[in-house]
Image (cartoon, rainbow, N blue to C red):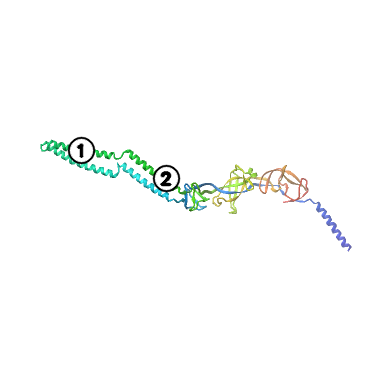
Amino acid sequence: MRKLLAALALVAVAAAVWGVLRGSRPPSVSFARVQRQKLVSAIPTNGKAEPIEWQAARAEIAGLASTVAVREGETVAKGAELAAIGDPALQADIDAGQAKVAEARANLSALEAGGKPAELTEIENSLSRARLDLEREQREADALQRLAEKQAATKEEAAAARDKLRQTQAEIAGIGKRRTSLVAQTDVAAAKARLDDAETGLKLARERAAQAVIRAPAAGVVYELAARPGAYLTAGGLVANIGRVDRMRVRVYVDEPELGRVAEGAAVAITWDGLPGKRWQGEVERKPASIQALGARQVGEVACVIANPGRELPIGANVNAEIRAGEAADALAIPAEALRRDAAGDYVFLLAGDHVERRAVRVGISNVVQAQVVEGLSEGDAVALPTDVPLKAGSRVTPAIQ
């Protein structure tokens, strides 16, 4: 019994000693080594894809859409028919215009030929009869003149025959003047003017009919198709947008504090949840000129241009973006979580033997997981990672190097 009590007492003493020793041991803190490596700084954010070039197709006249010849997402050539406005009056105007042109052209041709066919026929007939009379009267006058010379006819009969001949000659001359005066130059000019007016009216009717067909202003993909068969289209109203999608513009929303790290020409990578694993590469085209609210965020719209050769990224897609803000080939890197900051600036807790010391650092580029230290640390140094144990300069620790 005494031996058992002695053993229990020994165990109790050992436990007490172990507890005292354990209570005085410095707390365990994780540390990471400062390492040299390539460090890429990136700004992760989100954005929206849109065509790099686009044009709107709009109705030139108002009316009901009789046909819609395309579908959303369809690729069309420049000038392809998108939709048409049905209006029977348009074809009626063309038919009436063609009839007026034909009539005006016929009148002009008649005047340029010397007059209207009926009037010309009458004049030619009168002229032919007068010429026949002239030939006959010429023969009679010649015969009476010979007879008068032989005293077989009187001089009065011969003179009368010559007078009649002169009258017929005068009649022929009058008919000729009548034909010449049938068409005046002013009549031809007026007929030409009427033809011009008729042709102008026909041209306008055809142009108006052409305006009833809405065509693609450029080659590309149809999106935001607003026209529907039977829907009323207003003059100037949107029918569809046509965009180029082999290259696309992505409007990336960068939080205001990060905008200073964005540079024009910086590389950008785009991903889309609709195609996991697919990445589109591009670059920053333009930095924002203003800041705007986006929900609870204050952001700037950074315009980026990416290649989309397979046209897999659709217009209007909500995308994930990563802008490369910098790169260091041989950076002294520490975990970003080891970096601390207060009113005095950036600092870390550096392992010095069995305790830590505060070390001010100057930081270069960084990303979500790592930061570059350009001043204050050396390769191989160990810096404290976040811990539940409050640390201050001189705190003793039990280091756990990761």
Is residue 322 shown left or right of residue 399? Answer: left
For the N terminus, the quadrant is bottom right
Sequence-earlier tag: 2 or 1: 1
Is residue 93 shown left or right of residue 313? Answer: left
Q: Which residue is mark 2?
A: 204
Residue type (three-letter) at the residue carrying disc 1: Gln
Total marks in image:
2
For image coordinates 27% across by 39% down, the residue present is 178
Q: Residues within 10 Å of mark 1 (few under 14, many from 20)?
A: few
- Residue 82 seen in render: no
Q: Which mark is residue 167?
A: 1
Residue situated in front as seen by the camera: 214 or 175? 175
> Residue most toward the bottom?
1
**Residue 38 location, x and y as percent?**
65, 47
For image coordinates 74% across by 44% down, the residue present is 359
Residue situated in front as seen by the camera: 180 or 320? 180
For image coordinates 84% across by 55% down, the residue present is 17
> Residue most toward the left?
151
Q: CA distance from mark 2 to mark 1?
A: 56 Å
Q: Residues within 10 Å of mark 2 (few under 14, many from 20)?
A: some
Q: Give the SS element for disc 1.
A: helix
Residue situated in front as seen by the camera: 219 or 6? 219
**Residue 21 location, x and y as percent?**
82, 53
Q: Quadrant of residue 188?
A: top left
Residue type (three-letter) at the residue carrying disc 2: Leu
- Residue 197 seen in render: yes
Is residue 80 shown left or right of residue 152? Answer: right
The answer to whether 80 is drawn above or below residue 166 in the figure is below
Q: Give the SS element for disc 2.
A: helix
Is residue 94 shown left or right of residue 50? Answer: left
The answer to whether 17 is drawn above or below residue 202 in the figure is below
